[in-house]
Image (spheres, helix red, strand yellow):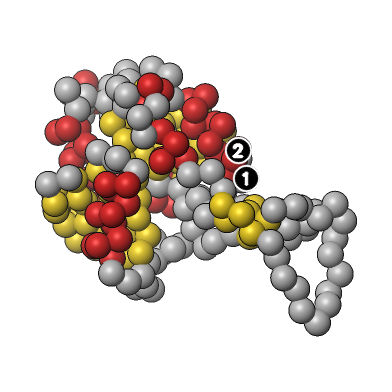
Amino acid sequence: MSRTGSSRLAGRIVVVTAGGTREPIDPVRYLGNRSSGKMGHAIAVAAADRGAQVRLITTVTAPDDERIATVKVDTAAEMNTAVRAALPGAMLLVMAAAVADYRVAEVAAKKMKKRDALTLDLVPTVDILRSLAGDPLGESVLVVGFAAETDNIEENAVRKLAEKRLDLVVLNDVSRADIGLGSHDNEVRVFDSGGLVAHLEKRAKPLVASALLDLIEKRLS
């Protein structure tokens, strides 16, 4: 881990997202996923350890760390608004959150009663990373995305890197129970436009976060 005084992140604004978004169906139900936010939170703490001004946007209970400025959100739209508000002046954006791909077209005003069958009309949520591609807001920001995949994992991660014009993509094989969503450990592969940058073997998520920031710091001018 870099020392605060020598870290390229020291004194710089770092934006991190964490957790799985929740898209409401009615006042008590939502579409969501099993992301715990542990990886994103570990990255936020690791960046704060290096002296960064961390802006954490999360859907779950944030670390009790006074060094981290936290914004709590629920939906993809709320996260998009919060990311855009946090980015001015930032050096780095790490999108570790598991953002839902779809939301209900029309949220029911009252609790929906149980029935024999139910069909939901789903529409795409805002694609936060894609919307930043080419946007002046992200021009001077190093953007790191996460790809949680279960099949054709490298192909899908590299496609995400290209389509969303990321600087780095972090591939997490969530088909594995030992490093899947909600686990304490992780094992990731990091890619850039030239291919595989690094394979960070299985370890506790705070250690993965530190190793990932070491890689990112080498990219920062």
Return the mark for residue 110.
none
**Quadrant assignment for the C terminus:** top left
Q: Residues within 10 Å of mark 1 (few under 14, many from 20)?
A: some
Callout 1 secondary element: loop
Amino acid bearing label 1: Asp
Residue placed under numbered mark 1 in the picture: 74
Tell which of 145 and 187 is nearer to you.
145
Front position among marks 1 and 2: 2
Residue, x 36% and y 39% (percent of image)? 94
Q: Amino acid at mark 2?
A: Glu
x 35%, y 29%: residue: 134
Side (left or right) of 92 relative to 119: left
Dot 2 falls on a residue whose secondary structure is: helix
Q: Which mark is residue 78?
A: 2
Relative placement, left or right, of 107 versus 13 is: right
Q: Quadrant of the N terminus?
A: top left
Tell me the residue at 52%/63% (across/down): 34
Marks 1/2 in contact by CB < 8 Å: the verdict is: yes
Q: Nearer the viewer, residue 43 or 33?
A: 33
Mark 1 vs mark 2, CA separation in Å: 7 Å
Residue 216 lies, in percent from the top left, at 22, 37
